Image (cartoon, rainbow, N blue to C red):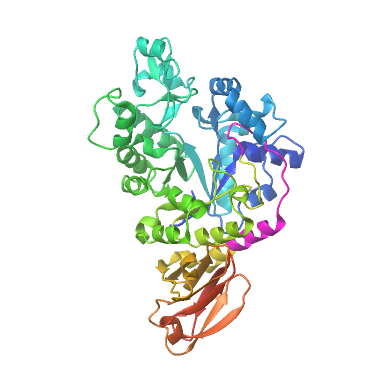
Protein backbone atom coordinates (compact mmCIF):
# COMPACT_ATOMS: atom_id res chain seq x y z
CA UNK A 1 0.00 0.00 0.00
CA UNK A 2 1.22 3.50 -0.87
CA UNK A 3 0.33 6.18 1.66
CA UNK A 4 -0.75 9.47 0.17
CA UNK A 5 0.85 12.67 1.44
CA UNK A 6 -1.29 15.09 3.42
CA UNK A 7 -1.91 17.20 0.30
CA UNK A 8 -1.72 14.83 -2.68
CA UNK A 9 -1.48 15.58 -6.38
CA UNK A 10 -3.92 13.30 -8.23
CA UNK A 11 -3.92 12.46 -11.94
CA UNK A 12 -7.25 11.25 -13.34
CA UNK A 13 -6.97 8.76 -16.21
CA UNK A 14 -9.84 7.41 -18.33
CA UNK A 15 -8.76 3.78 -18.09
CA UNK A 16 -10.43 2.36 -21.19
CA UNK A 17 -9.31 5.21 -23.43
CA UNK A 18 -5.77 5.06 -22.08
CA UNK A 19 -5.51 1.29 -22.56
CA UNK A 20 -6.93 1.50 -26.07
CA UNK A 21 -4.40 4.13 -27.10
CA UNK A 22 -1.60 2.20 -25.40
CA UNK A 23 -2.58 -0.87 -27.42
CA UNK A 24 -2.45 1.18 -30.61
CA UNK A 25 1.09 2.18 -29.69
CA UNK A 26 2.27 -1.34 -28.91
CA UNK A 27 0.35 -3.07 -31.69
CA UNK A 28 -1.06 -5.72 -29.36
CA UNK A 29 -4.04 -6.06 -27.01
CA UNK A 30 -3.32 -4.29 -23.74
CA UNK A 31 -4.88 -4.91 -20.35
CA UNK A 32 -3.74 -3.36 -17.11
CA UNK A 33 -1.11 -6.07 -16.66
CA UNK A 34 0.33 -5.47 -20.14
CA UNK A 35 1.01 -1.72 -19.97
CA UNK A 36 4.63 -0.95 -20.89
CA UNK A 37 6.91 1.05 -18.63
CA UNK A 38 6.88 4.20 -20.75
CA UNK A 39 3.06 4.35 -20.64
CA UNK A 40 3.15 4.21 -16.83
CA UNK A 41 5.84 6.87 -16.86
CA UNK A 42 3.60 9.07 -19.00
CA UNK A 43 0.79 9.17 -16.42
CA UNK A 44 3.07 9.41 -13.37
CA UNK A 45 5.26 12.45 -14.07
CA UNK A 46 7.31 13.94 -11.26
CA UNK A 47 4.98 15.54 -8.75
CA UNK A 48 2.06 13.10 -9.11
CA UNK A 49 1.24 11.26 -5.88
CA UNK A 50 -1.81 9.25 -6.98
CA UNK A 51 -3.42 7.99 -10.17
CA UNK A 52 -7.20 7.77 -10.30
CA UNK A 53 -8.01 4.97 -12.76
CA UNK A 54 -11.51 6.08 -13.68
CA UNK A 55 -13.89 3.40 -14.92
CA UNK A 56 -12.36 0.02 -14.02
CA UNK A 57 -15.53 -1.68 -12.74
CA UNK A 58 -17.88 -3.92 -14.70
CA UNK A 59 -20.28 -1.74 -16.65
CA UNK A 60 -23.89 -2.63 -17.23
CA UNK A 61 -24.89 -4.25 -20.55
CA UNK A 62 -28.43 -3.11 -19.91
CA UNK A 63 -27.26 0.42 -19.19
CA UNK A 64 -25.25 0.40 -22.42
CA UNK A 65 -28.32 -0.69 -24.38
CA UNK A 66 -30.29 2.19 -22.87
CA UNK A 67 -27.54 4.62 -23.90
CA UNK A 68 -27.47 3.26 -27.44
CA UNK A 69 -31.21 3.95 -27.74
CA UNK A 70 -31.00 7.49 -26.37
CA UNK A 71 -30.97 10.04 -29.26
CA UNK A 72 -29.61 12.86 -27.10
CA UNK A 73 -26.69 10.72 -25.90
CA UNK A 74 -25.95 9.47 -29.40
CA UNK A 75 -25.87 13.07 -30.59
CA UNK A 76 -23.40 13.97 -27.84
CA UNK A 77 -21.24 10.99 -28.75
CA UNK A 78 -21.12 12.04 -32.40
CA UNK A 79 -20.37 15.65 -31.46
CA UNK A 80 -17.31 14.46 -29.53
CA UNK A 81 -16.14 11.81 -32.03
CA UNK A 82 -17.71 12.34 -35.44
CA UNK A 83 -17.16 8.77 -36.67
CA UNK A 84 -18.05 7.00 -33.43
CA UNK A 85 -19.41 3.47 -33.81
CA UNK A 86 -21.31 1.19 -31.47
CA UNK A 87 -18.15 -0.79 -30.78
CA UNK A 88 -16.62 2.39 -29.30
CA UNK A 89 -19.49 2.89 -26.83
CA UNK A 90 -18.66 0.97 -23.66
CA UNK A 91 -21.47 2.32 -21.50
CA UNK A 92 -21.27 4.57 -18.48
CA UNK A 93 -18.63 3.84 -15.81
CA UNK A 94 -21.18 5.21 -13.33
CA UNK A 95 -23.79 2.63 -14.31
CA UNK A 96 -22.07 -0.21 -12.49
CA UNK A 97 -23.28 -3.78 -12.57
CA UNK A 98 -20.64 -5.14 -10.22
CA UNK A 99 -17.60 -3.88 -8.32
CA UNK A 100 -15.46 -6.41 -10.13
CA UNK A 101 -12.68 -5.24 -12.43
CA UNK A 102 -13.87 -5.51 -16.01
CA UNK A 103 -12.31 -8.52 -17.75
CA UNK A 104 -11.79 -6.34 -20.82
CA UNK A 105 -9.26 -4.40 -18.73
CA UNK A 106 -7.52 -7.49 -17.38
CA UNK A 107 -9.78 -8.36 -14.45
CA UNK A 108 -8.64 -8.40 -10.83
CA UNK A 109 -5.19 -9.72 -11.75
CA UNK A 110 -4.70 -6.79 -14.11
CA UNK A 111 -5.64 -4.28 -11.44
CA UNK A 112 -3.26 -5.96 -8.97
CA UNK A 113 -0.46 -5.65 -11.53
CA UNK A 114 -1.33 -1.99 -12.09
CA UNK A 115 -1.29 -1.27 -8.38
CA UNK A 116 2.09 -2.96 -8.01
CA UNK A 117 3.47 -0.90 -10.90
CA UNK A 118 2.25 2.31 -9.31
CA UNK A 119 3.52 1.25 -5.90
CA UNK A 120 7.01 0.75 -7.33
CA UNK A 121 6.89 4.41 -8.32
CA UNK A 122 5.62 5.51 -4.91
CA UNK A 123 2.28 6.44 -6.48
CA UNK A 124 -1.06 5.55 -4.86
CA UNK A 125 -4.11 4.16 -6.67
CA UNK A 126 -7.59 5.69 -6.46
CA UNK A 127 -10.77 4.09 -7.80
CA UNK A 128 -14.44 5.07 -8.08
CA UNK A 129 -17.39 4.26 -5.87
CA UNK A 130 -20.97 5.21 -6.76
CA UNK A 131 -23.02 5.23 -3.53
CA UNK A 132 -26.30 6.62 -4.87
CA UNK A 133 -27.33 3.99 -7.42
CA UNK A 134 -26.55 0.77 -9.28
CA UNK A 135 -27.37 -0.56 -12.73
CA UNK A 136 -30.78 -2.20 -13.31
CA UNK A 137 -29.02 -5.53 -13.95
CA UNK A 138 -27.00 -5.40 -10.73
CA UNK A 139 -27.46 -8.61 -8.69
CA UNK A 140 -28.66 -6.40 -5.84
CA UNK A 141 -31.83 -5.56 -7.80
CA UNK A 142 -33.09 -9.13 -7.66
CA UNK A 143 -31.33 -10.34 -4.52
CA UNK A 144 -31.79 -7.34 -2.23
CA UNK A 145 -34.80 -5.15 -3.07
CA UNK A 146 -34.61 -3.91 0.55
CA UNK A 147 -31.54 -1.86 -0.46
CA UNK A 148 -33.62 0.41 -2.73
CA UNK A 149 -36.14 3.21 -2.63
CA UNK A 150 -39.42 1.39 -3.29
CA UNK A 151 -42.58 2.24 -5.11
CA UNK A 152 -45.87 0.46 -5.76
CA UNK A 153 -47.24 -0.95 -9.04
CA UNK A 154 -49.30 2.21 -9.61
CA UNK A 155 -46.06 4.28 -9.61
CA UNK A 156 -44.57 2.24 -12.45
CA UNK A 157 -47.79 2.57 -14.46
CA UNK A 158 -48.15 6.28 -13.76
CA UNK A 159 -44.50 7.29 -14.25
CA UNK A 160 -42.36 4.57 -15.89
CA UNK A 161 -39.55 7.11 -16.38
CA UNK A 162 -39.21 7.35 -12.59
CA UNK A 163 -39.94 3.77 -11.50
CA UNK A 164 -38.81 0.33 -12.65
CA UNK A 165 -41.02 -2.73 -12.22
CA UNK A 166 -38.63 -5.68 -11.88
CA UNK A 167 -41.40 -8.24 -11.59
CA UNK A 168 -40.54 -8.75 -7.93
CA UNK A 169 -40.64 -5.14 -6.77
CA UNK A 170 -41.13 -1.59 -8.02
CA UNK A 171 -37.95 0.40 -7.52
CA UNK A 172 -37.26 4.10 -8.03
CA UNK A 173 -34.84 5.12 -10.72
CA UNK A 174 -31.78 7.06 -9.59
CA UNK A 175 -31.86 10.84 -9.46
CA UNK A 176 -30.69 13.98 -7.75
CA UNK A 177 -33.17 16.65 -6.61
CA UNK A 178 -32.59 19.03 -9.53
CA UNK A 179 -32.89 16.77 -12.57
CA UNK A 180 -35.29 14.17 -13.96
CA UNK A 181 -34.57 10.52 -13.08
CA UNK A 182 -31.68 8.81 -14.83
CA UNK A 183 -33.09 6.00 -17.01
CA UNK A 184 -30.16 3.61 -16.64
CA UNK A 185 -29.79 3.31 -12.84
CA UNK A 186 -31.82 2.28 -9.77
CA UNK A 187 -31.93 4.34 -6.58
CA UNK A 188 -30.35 2.97 -3.39
CA UNK A 189 -31.96 3.88 -0.08
CA UNK A 190 -29.49 5.77 2.10
CA UNK A 191 -31.78 5.35 5.11
CA UNK A 192 -31.91 1.53 4.95
CA UNK A 193 -29.65 -0.08 7.59
CA UNK A 194 -29.05 -3.08 5.32
CA UNK A 195 -27.83 -0.79 2.52
CA UNK A 196 -25.45 1.02 4.85
CA UNK A 197 -23.97 -2.28 5.96
CA UNK A 198 -23.69 -3.51 2.36
CA UNK A 199 -22.00 -0.25 1.32
CA UNK A 200 -19.41 -0.65 4.07
CA UNK A 201 -18.77 -4.23 2.97
CA UNK A 202 -18.26 -3.24 -0.68
CA UNK A 203 -15.99 -0.34 0.24
CA UNK A 204 -14.06 -2.64 2.55
CA UNK A 205 -13.49 -5.03 -0.34
CA UNK A 206 -12.45 -2.15 -2.61
CA UNK A 207 -10.00 -1.07 0.08
CA UNK A 208 -8.16 -4.38 -0.43
CA UNK A 209 -7.25 -3.42 -4.01
CA UNK A 210 -6.52 0.33 -3.88
CA UNK A 211 -5.41 3.15 -1.60
CA UNK A 212 -8.50 5.36 -1.79
CA UNK A 213 -11.80 6.03 -3.52
CA UNK A 214 -13.52 8.96 -5.14
CA UNK A 215 -17.18 8.81 -4.12
CA UNK A 216 -19.49 9.98 -6.88
CA UNK A 217 -22.04 12.68 -5.91
CA UNK A 218 -21.38 12.01 -2.23
CA UNK A 219 -23.70 14.76 -0.97
CA UNK A 220 -26.77 12.91 -2.29
CA UNK A 221 -26.49 10.44 0.61
CA UNK A 222 -26.55 13.09 3.35
CA UNK A 223 -29.68 12.74 5.49
CA UNK A 224 -31.16 16.17 4.79
CA UNK A 225 -30.42 16.04 1.05
CA UNK A 226 -31.83 12.53 0.75
CA UNK A 227 -34.96 13.45 2.68
CA UNK A 228 -35.57 16.52 0.47
CA UNK A 229 -35.10 14.39 -2.64
CA UNK A 230 -37.33 11.47 -1.67
CA UNK A 231 -39.74 12.67 1.01
CA UNK A 232 -41.39 9.83 2.91
CA UNK A 233 -40.56 7.02 0.46
CA UNK A 234 -37.26 5.94 2.12
CA UNK A 235 -38.83 5.76 5.57
CA UNK A 236 -37.89 7.71 8.71
CA UNK A 237 -34.66 9.71 8.77
CA UNK A 238 -32.02 7.83 10.82
CA UNK A 239 -30.39 9.49 13.79
CA UNK A 240 -26.92 8.89 12.34
CA UNK A 241 -25.73 10.23 9.02
CA UNK A 242 -24.91 7.80 6.20
CA UNK A 243 -21.25 8.66 5.76
CA UNK A 244 -20.03 8.62 9.37
CA UNK A 245 -21.64 5.23 9.86
CA UNK A 246 -20.19 3.78 6.64
CA UNK A 247 -16.73 5.35 6.81
CA UNK A 248 -16.22 4.39 10.44
CA UNK A 249 -16.92 0.77 9.55
CA UNK A 250 -14.58 0.83 6.55
CA UNK A 251 -11.76 2.51 8.43
CA UNK A 252 -11.98 -0.21 11.03
CA UNK A 253 -10.54 -2.45 8.29
CA UNK A 254 -8.49 0.13 6.36
CA UNK A 255 -7.46 2.99 8.67
CA UNK A 256 -5.32 4.71 6.01
CA UNK A 257 -7.83 4.48 3.15
CA UNK A 258 -8.43 7.92 1.62
CA UNK A 259 -11.94 9.12 0.75
CA UNK A 260 -12.56 11.87 -1.81
CA UNK A 261 -16.06 13.30 -2.19
CA UNK A 262 -17.45 14.70 -5.38
CA UNK A 263 -19.37 17.50 -3.67
CA UNK A 264 -21.48 20.45 -4.76
CA UNK A 265 -24.01 22.92 -3.30
CA UNK A 266 -21.50 24.31 -0.75
CA UNK A 267 -21.62 21.08 1.27
CA UNK A 268 -17.85 20.55 1.36
CA UNK A 269 -17.43 21.49 5.02
CA UNK A 270 -20.33 19.29 6.08
CA UNK A 271 -18.85 16.31 4.22
CA UNK A 272 -15.42 16.94 5.72
CA UNK A 273 -17.01 16.80 9.16
CA UNK A 274 -18.73 13.55 8.18
CA UNK A 275 -15.40 11.88 7.53
CA UNK A 276 -14.17 12.71 4.03
CA UNK A 277 -10.49 13.53 3.64
CA UNK A 278 -11.07 15.73 0.59
CA UNK A 279 -14.05 17.31 -1.19
CA UNK A 280 -14.26 18.90 -4.63
CA UNK A 281 -13.75 22.67 -4.61
CA UNK A 282 -16.22 23.44 -7.37
CA UNK A 283 -16.71 26.95 -6.00
CA UNK A 284 -13.07 27.86 -6.68
CA UNK A 285 -13.33 26.36 -10.18
CA UNK A 286 -16.35 28.54 -10.97
CA UNK A 287 -14.71 31.66 -9.56
CA UNK A 288 -11.51 31.13 -11.54
CA UNK A 289 -13.44 30.66 -14.77
CA UNK A 290 -16.22 33.21 -14.40
CA UNK A 291 -15.56 35.66 -11.58
CA UNK A 292 -13.02 38.27 -10.50
CA UNK A 293 -9.71 37.95 -8.70
CA UNK A 294 -11.37 39.60 -5.70
CA UNK A 295 -13.91 36.76 -5.65
CA UNK A 296 -11.09 34.21 -5.73
CA UNK A 297 -9.31 36.06 -2.91
CA UNK A 298 -12.47 36.03 -0.80
CA UNK A 299 -12.74 32.28 -1.33
CA UNK A 300 -9.13 31.78 -0.22
CA UNK A 301 -9.70 33.62 3.06
CA UNK A 302 -11.30 30.46 4.45
CA UNK A 303 -9.56 28.67 7.31
CA UNK A 304 -6.43 26.82 6.18
CA UNK A 305 -7.50 23.58 7.87
CA UNK A 306 -10.70 23.59 5.82
CA UNK A 307 -8.81 24.36 2.62
CA UNK A 308 -6.46 21.43 3.21
CA UNK A 309 -9.51 19.18 2.79
CA UNK A 310 -10.45 20.54 -0.66
CA UNK A 311 -9.64 19.24 -4.15
CA UNK A 312 -8.56 22.03 -6.53
CA UNK A 313 -8.97 21.49 -10.27
CA UNK A 314 -9.29 23.25 -13.64
CA UNK A 315 -11.01 20.31 -15.32
CA UNK A 316 -12.14 16.73 -14.76
CA UNK A 317 -14.28 14.33 -16.77
CA UNK A 318 -17.46 16.23 -15.81
CA UNK A 319 -16.14 19.66 -16.82
CA UNK A 320 -15.10 21.09 -20.19
CA UNK A 321 -11.44 20.92 -21.08
CA UNK A 322 -9.37 23.80 -19.70
CA UNK A 323 -7.80 24.41 -23.12
CA UNK A 324 -11.29 25.16 -24.43
CA UNK A 325 -12.65 27.20 -21.52
CA UNK A 326 -9.53 29.23 -20.70
CA UNK A 327 -7.25 31.44 -22.77
CA UNK A 328 -3.82 29.76 -22.80
CA UNK A 329 -2.18 32.45 -20.65
CA UNK A 330 -5.05 32.41 -18.17
CA UNK A 331 -4.86 28.62 -17.93
CA UNK A 332 -1.19 28.84 -17.00
CA UNK A 333 -1.84 31.49 -14.36
CA UNK A 334 -4.71 29.49 -12.86
CA UNK A 335 -2.60 26.33 -12.89
CA UNK A 336 0.21 28.03 -10.96
CA UNK A 337 -2.36 29.22 -8.43
CA UNK A 338 -4.03 25.86 -7.76
CA UNK A 339 -0.69 24.00 -7.78
CA UNK A 340 0.51 26.16 -4.88
CA UNK A 341 -2.65 26.20 -2.75
CA UNK A 342 -3.31 23.96 0.25
CA UNK A 343 -5.41 20.87 -0.35
CA UNK A 344 -5.33 18.12 -2.96
CA UNK A 345 -4.74 19.02 -6.60
CA UNK A 346 -6.50 17.15 -9.40
CA UNK A 347 -5.19 17.09 -12.96
CA UNK A 348 -6.98 15.34 -15.81
CA UNK A 349 -5.15 13.18 -18.36
CA UNK A 350 -4.90 15.15 -21.60
CA UNK A 351 -4.90 18.48 -19.78
CA UNK A 352 -1.11 18.64 -19.93
CA UNK A 353 -1.11 18.32 -23.73
CA UNK A 354 -3.94 20.75 -24.43
CA UNK A 355 -6.79 18.42 -25.38
CA UNK A 356 -9.95 20.40 -26.11
CA UNK A 357 -12.67 17.76 -26.58
CA UNK A 358 -14.61 16.79 -23.46
CA UNK A 359 -15.20 13.09 -24.01
CA UNK A 360 -18.47 11.53 -22.82
CA UNK A 361 -17.56 8.91 -20.23
CA UNK A 362 -19.55 6.29 -22.19
CA UNK A 363 -16.89 6.20 -24.92
CA UNK A 364 -13.61 4.34 -25.01
CA UNK A 365 -12.25 6.18 -28.05
CA UNK A 366 -11.46 9.85 -28.40
CA UNK A 367 -10.54 11.94 -31.43
CA UNK A 368 -6.95 12.58 -32.39
CA UNK A 369 -5.88 16.03 -31.27
CA UNK A 370 -2.53 17.75 -31.74
CA UNK A 371 -0.34 17.92 -28.66
CA UNK A 372 0.84 21.33 -27.43
CA UNK A 373 4.56 20.87 -26.65
CA UNK A 374 4.86 24.23 -24.91
CA UNK A 375 1.91 23.50 -22.62
CA UNK A 376 3.26 20.04 -21.89
CA UNK A 377 6.61 21.53 -20.92
CA UNK A 378 4.90 24.13 -18.72
CA UNK A 379 2.89 21.56 -16.77
CA UNK A 380 5.83 19.20 -16.43
CA UNK A 381 7.98 21.97 -15.02
CA UNK A 382 5.23 23.27 -12.73
CA UNK A 383 4.47 19.91 -11.14
CA UNK A 384 8.13 18.99 -10.74
CA UNK A 385 9.07 22.40 -9.35
CA UNK A 386 6.37 22.48 -6.71
CA UNK A 387 7.09 18.89 -5.73
CA UNK A 388 10.86 19.37 -5.58
CA UNK A 389 10.56 22.53 -3.50
CA UNK A 390 8.66 20.78 -0.70
CA UNK A 391 6.73 24.00 -0.13
CA UNK A 392 3.40 22.28 0.56
CA UNK A 393 4.85 20.52 3.59
CA UNK A 394 4.67 23.83 5.46
CA UNK A 395 1.98 26.25 6.59
CA UNK A 396 0.14 28.34 4.01
CA UNK A 397 -1.04 31.94 4.30
CA UNK A 398 -2.92 34.35 2.02
CA UNK A 399 -1.14 37.70 1.73
CA UNK A 400 -2.30 41.26 1.15
CA UNK A 401 -1.63 43.02 -2.14
CA UNK A 402 -1.43 46.76 -1.47
CA UNK A 403 -2.10 49.26 -4.25
CA UNK A 404 -2.20 53.03 -4.59
CA UNK A 405 -5.02 55.60 -4.87
CA UNK A 406 -4.31 56.12 -8.57
CA UNK A 407 -3.65 52.44 -9.36
CA UNK A 408 -6.24 49.82 -8.43
CA UNK A 409 -4.63 46.95 -10.35
CA UNK A 410 -3.48 45.35 -7.07
CA UNK A 411 -6.98 43.91 -6.74
CA UNK A 412 -6.18 41.60 -9.68
CA UNK A 413 -3.31 39.92 -7.83
CA UNK A 414 -3.43 36.86 -5.57
CA UNK A 415 -0.40 36.43 -3.30
CA UNK A 416 0.29 33.67 -0.79
CA UNK A 417 3.21 32.06 0.97
CA UNK A 418 4.37 28.79 2.50
CA UNK A 419 6.57 28.54 5.58
CA UNK A 420 8.01 25.30 6.83
CA UNK A 421 10.93 22.88 7.00
CA UNK A 422 11.60 23.25 3.27
CA UNK A 423 11.93 27.04 3.56
CA UNK A 424 9.92 30.11 2.66
CA UNK A 425 8.05 30.39 -0.62
CA UNK A 426 6.03 33.14 -2.26
CA UNK A 427 3.49 32.90 -5.09
CA UNK A 428 1.98 35.93 -6.84
CA UNK A 429 -0.50 35.49 -9.70
CA UNK A 430 -2.06 38.15 -11.90
CA UNK A 431 -5.60 36.95 -12.64
CA UNK A 432 -6.30 39.58 -15.27
CA UNK A 433 -5.64 40.39 -18.89
CA UNK A 434 -3.77 43.61 -18.12
CA UNK A 435 -0.61 44.51 -16.17
CA UNK A 436 -0.93 44.74 -12.39
CA UNK A 437 1.29 46.26 -9.70
CA UNK A 438 1.28 46.05 -5.92
CA UNK A 439 3.34 45.89 -2.78
CA UNK A 440 3.18 42.53 -1.00
CA UNK A 441 4.30 42.70 2.66
CA UNK A 442 5.86 39.42 3.74
CA UNK A 443 4.96 37.95 7.15
CA UNK A 444 8.28 36.52 8.25
CA UNK A 445 9.50 38.18 11.45
CA UNK A 446 13.06 37.02 10.85
CA UNK A 447 13.42 39.32 7.84
CA UNK A 448 16.00 41.69 9.28
CA UNK A 449 17.97 44.54 7.69
CA UNK A 450 20.18 42.24 5.62
CA UNK A 451 19.60 41.56 1.96
CA UNK A 452 17.37 38.56 1.30
CA UNK A 453 17.47 36.57 -1.88
CA UNK A 454 14.36 35.77 -3.92
CA UNK A 455 15.02 32.93 -6.35
CA UNK A 456 12.59 32.30 -9.18
CA UNK A 457 11.87 28.57 -9.03
CA UNK A 458 11.05 28.48 -12.74
CA UNK A 459 13.92 30.32 -14.41
CA UNK A 460 16.40 30.49 -11.45
CA UNK A 461 16.73 34.29 -11.67
CA UNK A 462 17.73 35.83 -8.35
CA UNK A 463 16.80 39.16 -6.83
CA UNK A 464 18.18 40.78 -3.68
CA UNK A 465 15.84 42.80 -1.48
CA UNK A 466 16.17 44.39 1.94
CA UNK A 467 14.38 42.49 4.71
CA UNK A 468 13.17 45.79 6.13
CA UNK A 469 11.50 46.61 2.81
CA UNK A 470 10.00 43.13 2.46
CA UNK A 471 8.43 43.26 5.91
CA UNK A 472 7.49 46.93 5.80
CA UNK A 473 6.18 48.39 2.55
CA UNK A 474 6.48 44.95 0.95
CA UNK A 475 7.91 43.38 -2.17
CA UNK A 476 7.13 45.48 -5.23
CA UNK A 477 5.65 43.34 -8.00
CA UNK A 478 4.80 44.34 -11.55
CA UNK A 479 3.28 41.45 -13.48
CA UNK A 480 2.19 41.34 -17.12
CA UNK A 481 -1.29 40.03 -18.04
CA UNK A 482 -1.71 36.57 -16.48
CA UNK A 483 1.86 36.76 -15.19
CA UNK A 484 3.13 34.80 -12.18
CA UNK A 485 5.96 34.78 -9.65
CA UNK A 486 7.05 31.64 -7.83
CA UNK A 487 9.91 32.45 -5.46
CA UNK A 488 11.89 30.83 -2.72
CA UNK A 489 13.06 33.38 -0.15
CA UNK A 490 16.34 32.82 1.69
CA UNK A 491 18.86 34.74 3.73
CA UNK A 492 21.83 34.43 6.02
CA UNK A 493 20.13 33.00 9.07
CA UNK A 494 20.46 29.60 10.74
CA UNK A 495 16.97 28.51 9.65
CA UNK A 496 17.63 28.95 5.92
Q: Tell whether position 467 is magenta.
A: no
Q: Indicate the position of residue 16 as horizontal and vertical percent values.
A: 62, 36
At horizontal 50% and vertical 32% (from top left) the residue drawn is: 94
Which quadrant of the view contains residue 231?
top left
Whether residue 3 is visible, yes or no, is no
Q: Indicate the position of residue 481 as horizontal and vertical percent values.
A: 59, 66
> Where 408 falls versus 128 (above or below)?
below
> Where 324 falls versus 413 (above or below)?
above
The reply, left or right, for residue 330 in relation to residue 20 is left
At horizontal 58% and vertical 62% (from top left) the residue drawn is: 433
Q: Along the line of sight, which residue is nearer the eye, 439 or 254?
A: 439
Q: Along the line of sight, which residue is nearer the eye, 139 or 269?
A: 269
The reply, left or right, for residue 265 in relation to residue 11 is left
Q: Along the line of sight, which residue is nearer the eye, 2 or 401?
A: 401
- Farthest residue, direction bottom: 449
Q: Indicate the position of residue 137 as horizontal and vertical percent values.
A: 49, 19
Magenta residues, start to end: 359-382
- Farthest residue, direction left: 239
Q: Along the line of sight, which residue is nearer the eye, 367 or 215?
A: 367
At horizontal 53% and vertical 54% (from top left) the residue drawn is: 49
> Where 18 falls versus 3 (above or below)?
above
At horizontal 45% and vertical 74% (from top left) the residue drawn is: 403
Whether residue 88 is visible, yes or no, is yes
- Farthest residue, direction front: 406
Q: Tell whether position 377 is magenta.
A: yes
Amino acid sequence: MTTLPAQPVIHEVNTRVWLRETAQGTGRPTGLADVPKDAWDEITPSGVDAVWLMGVWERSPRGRAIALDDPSLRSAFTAAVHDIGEADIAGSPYCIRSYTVDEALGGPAGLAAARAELDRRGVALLLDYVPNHVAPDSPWVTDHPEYFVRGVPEDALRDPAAFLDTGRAVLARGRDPFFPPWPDVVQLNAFAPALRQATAEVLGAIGQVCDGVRCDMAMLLMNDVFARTWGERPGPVPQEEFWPEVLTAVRGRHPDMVFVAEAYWDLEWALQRQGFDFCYDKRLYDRLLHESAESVRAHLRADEAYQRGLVRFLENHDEPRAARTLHSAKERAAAVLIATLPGATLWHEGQFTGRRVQLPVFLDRRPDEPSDPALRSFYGQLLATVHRSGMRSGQWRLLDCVGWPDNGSARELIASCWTGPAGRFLTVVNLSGHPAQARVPLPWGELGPDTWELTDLVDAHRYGRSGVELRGSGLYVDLPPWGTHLFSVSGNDPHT
